[in-house]
Image: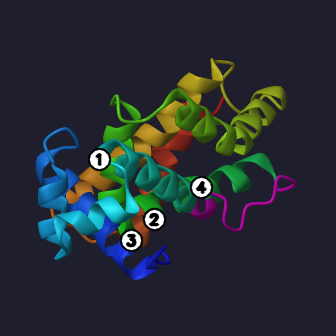
Amino acid sequence: MKARDETKIGQIFAATLQLVVEMGIAGITMRQIAKKARLATGTLYIYFRDKDDLIHQLYEDCRNASINAYFKGYDPDLPFKEGFRIIWINILHFRIENFDAAVFMEQSYHSPFISESSKEMSRDLLRPLFKLMERGKEAKVVKELDTVLLLMFMVGSTNDVIKYIKYHQRKLTDDIIQQAFTLCWDGLKR
């Protein structure tokens, strides 16, 4: 049995991410992925059983990388607003710097390619974010609304900034970050 070549897996993952942005997750084939990765189609099947397996493994890889980035520098003992700001900015930067992965994760989560166990893994990895928001509600710092709705608002605010930056070829500046964070904060705070 040949050892896994992580370089080839990286090529396959990068090609898949690019194709998902270009064509959507449902529209891509293993042949297209192989061509984009500059590999023989058969090589893909050495590493992945089929497209579902590839998408599933790529989703887990992207989700783990994103979670690690989201919580970089975060300490649950920080005051609520400070911890919230760190995570909000981390999400913004990760999704801008890894735009293809962000698009892929969004499409994957709402597709039949991702299993319930993978979705549950995602929810487990995001538990610190749920805990942060619950702490904000207990301290009466944020609105007393459903936690999922609060998190949807938080993530939605980063997604809209990212779309603005990406689709209008803008530069992400400290001023834009501050203004966008202020808008998000003002929408959540009591």
- Find the distance from the CA under tag 2 to the CA under tag 4: 12 Å
Q: Tell me if I can see residue 38 in this picture.
A: yes
Residue drawn at the location 83% of the way across and 32% of the way down: 139
- Find the distance from the CA under tag 4 to the CA under tag 1: 24 Å
Question: Quick one: 51 or 140, which is closer to the camera?
Answer: 51
Question: In front: mark 2 or mark 1?
Answer: 1
Label 3 residue SS: helix
Quick check: is 70 in the magenta stretch?
Answer: yes
Q: Position of residue 186 (x, y in %)?
A: 54, 38
**Contact between labelled residues 4 and 2, with CB atoms less than 8 Å apart:** no
**Contact between labelled residues 1 and 4, with CB atoms less than 8 Å apart:** no
Residue type marked 2: His
Where does label 3 land, which residue? 9
Q: Residues within 10 Å of mark 1 (few under 14, many from 20)?
A: some
Whether residue 80 is situated above or below residue 171 in the rendered picture: above
Q: Earlier in the sequence, mark 4 or mark 3?
A: 3
Residue type marked 4: Ile
Q: Residues within 10 Å of mark 2 (few under 14, many from 20)?
A: some
Where does label 4 land, which residue? 67
Q: Position of residue 175 (x, y in %)?
A: 40, 66
Residue drawn at the location 12% of the way across and 58% of the way down: 32
Where does label 1 land, which residue? 51
Give the magenta part as a residue range: 68-78
Q: Earlier in the sequence, mark 2 or mark 1?
A: 1
